[in-house]
Image (cartoon, grey):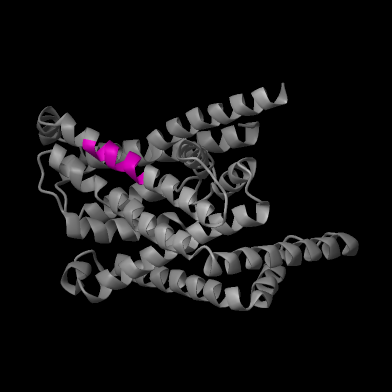
Amino acid sequence: MDRNQKRWLYVSLGFSAVVLVAVLYFTVDASTVQYLRALNPFWLVLALSAHVAALCFWALRIQFMSRSLGYKVGFLYSFNLVCANMLLAAVTPSSAGGEPVRIHELYKAGVKVGDASAIVITERILDGIVLGIGGAFFMFVLGSEWKRIGSVFSYVMYISWIVVTVIVVLFIYSVKNPGLMKRIIHYCSRWFTRTWESKKIEQFAQSVDREVDNFHTTLAEFLSHGKAGLVYGLVFTALFWFCEFIIVSFLLIGLSQPPIFVESLIMQLVIALIMMIPLTPGSSGIAEISFTSLYGLFVNSSILGILVVLWRAILFYFNILLGLVASLVIVQREARLAE
């Protein structure tokens, strides 16, 4: 990890710690101690196991999607790749920032850069499809439960769902019309190529066109010969998010509280979409505030602060620990190859 990444990691940890301390300050009372004494470690282990299971499903998604394109990527390698990706995600804006790590590690496993990019981008599209379908389900089927989270977060969910749906639709359309994707990338790139020399801009444009063509070819390969990979990818994506969303209910049971599976699925969906907005490194601070605001409608205030701490300990701090270990494995592997 370079100096810049370390600085952003410290910033991310600092944001999270400050917000957690503030939440604890306003929620801890005499009853909190009693809840902590009654804490059942079994449910904490089960919550942590659900998160590990989610990471395994993520690794399986990468493995099966790679296999559908003719590449053999082992499960353990994919799992280490996923863990290393989470460290970078913790130091970049939003919670979805580890794509370069996944592409690099897939390339090291023998996957072509274009194919690796297609796999990683398709992963995000599958996430969008699952979250979009989940959002539609909760908005139209669970109307009464949906209204309980309040109008502000409902509007956030509506807007997020619309944005995700538009992105997925544009992506699907661009598969048939790669020229659209080229125009979008060229338009967006104008914001950071204004000061470049004309020759450099032309070379960049040619590189963009070449990579988009490679990406389009790979997607065509997915749709023609790798359909099984997309099906498996969609299944493992759904299982990933399900495991992540039930963690809070396990924690509540461990704190001697009734689980709120339905409400929790709604709120976790909202939080997942909010955390994808690039506001702070690893969405630190944003995640804690969103969680506190939403679960404060359903959870006893005496345990709300403890619940937030346990949730972030599993989904953020534990991720950083796994990411550091996985990154060390990669460094040792590269050192052996360099000898």
User: Where's the C terminus, which quadrant?
Assistant: top right
Residue at position x 44%, y 51% from top? 61
Whether residue 152 can be seen here:
no
**Magenta segment, prevailing SS (helix, strand or loop):** helix
Residue 328 higher or lower than 136, as above or below = above
Asked if residue 49 lies in the magenta stretch, the reply is yes
Q: Residue at x 80, y 65 (%)?
A: 206
Q: Position of residue 34 (x, y in %)?
A: 9, 31
Side of 91 relative to 110 (left or right)? left
Point 86% across, 59% down: residue:
200
* Viewer-closest of 308 and 202: 202
Q: Is 88 situated above or below 295?
A: above
Q: Where's residue 170, x and y in %?
A: 54, 75
Whether 241 is drawn above or below 319: the answer is below
The front one of 5 and 219 is 219
Q: Is residue 165 magenta?
A: no
Quadrant holding the N terminus? top right
- On the image, the x and y values in percent for residue 104 come to 62, 44
Residue at 21% x, 52% y is: 296
Residue segment shown in magenta: 46-54
